[in-house]
Amino acid sequence: MDNRAIGIFDSGVGGVTVLKELQKLLPNENFAYIGDTASFPYGSKSKKTIIELCKKRIENLIDMEVKMIVIACGTATSQALEEMQAMFNIPIIGIIKPTVRYLRDMNFKKIGVIATTGTIRSNGWEEKIKESIPEAKVQNKACPLLAPMAEEGWIDNEIAKLAIHEYLKDIKNIDALVLGCTHYPLFKKIIKGEVGENVDIINTGEMVAREVREYIRKNKMENGNSENGDTQIYLTDLECNFINVAKKLLQAEDVKIQKIG
């Protein structure tokens, strides 16, 4: 048994969609979440900068003595996961591989991917999908406005609807749409209305939660506590709308935030 927390980080509030799924599947685990709000957004930054930011956040989490780390960010996963795994002696899981495994198991062949500009530019999703599903046809689309809109809480207004319509209008004839940025599940209702009921909307947080559960069980790292676990949230900049969006996501009356450097 291992009662240490599971560490999670993202550029902002998007990774809370992953935290929510982890809490659902692993209610007795402890979590430490870092939102790097001072450096938001990651999607427009260079690979070198993203690696530096990820290194700092992982060092923060290691200082908290977490037992494993989830990179709850599509951009950071696509551009820095392998470097972080080589750099640190701690289990680190990103959002891409668990999701690709699900796509393969479900036998999806016509796949859309929406993500930040940096993630689409890196081609990380398409490469991993085609490694696992060589016959897959992948349609990629960068949606750079969605993450900043999610941070503002603009997730169900006319601006969100117009932006999503514009981004998705050219994605046609798909079986599944991967929400390749963890902010995007906040727009799931609008996205579903745009692509139709027959398209499977893939929330990467659900796939990551299953992967983490399997990993900690296999490696006997479960928390021995039978009660609900504790979640600590840290932000690198408190002057943001994070708390309002996080409350809605976690369905919590009070979300306590601590500052971290």
Image (cartoon, helix red, strand yellow):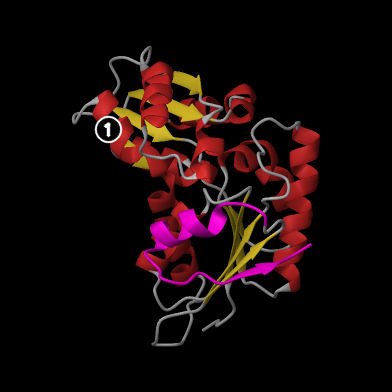
Q: Which residue is mark 1?
A: 192
Q: The C terminus lies in which quarter of the figure?
A: bottom right
Residue at image position (80%, 36%) is 48
Residue at image position (49%, 69%) is 216
On screen, residue 212 above or below 124: below
Label total for image: 1
Q: Is residue 62 left or right of residue 183?
A: right
On screen, residue 7 above or below 75: below
On screen, residue 49 above or below 235: above
Outermost left residue: 197
Instruction: Tell which of 169 and 69 is nearer to you.
Output: 169
- Write down the region rendered in magenta: 239-261
Classify residue 148 by image quadrant.
top right
Q: Position of residue 162 (x, y in %)?
A: 38, 22
Please tell me whether residue 242 belongs to the stretch shown in magenta. Answer: yes
Other residues around mark 1 within 10 Å, as few (<14) / some (14–19) / many (≥20): some
Q: Is residue 182 visible?
A: no
Q: Position of residue 161 (x, y in %)?
A: 36, 27
Q: Circle 1 — which element? A: helix
Q: Is residue 196 left or right of residue 96?
A: left
Residue at image position (54%, 29%) is 145
Please tell me whether residue 84 belongs to the stretch shown in magenta. Answer: no
Q: Position of residue 46 (x, y in %)?
A: 76, 31
Q: Is residue 69 left or right of residue 48?
A: left
Residue at image position (53%, 60%) is 243
Q: Position of residue 144 (x, y in %)?
A: 56, 27
**Label 1 is placed on what type of residue?**
Lys
Q: Is residue 115 visible?
A: yes
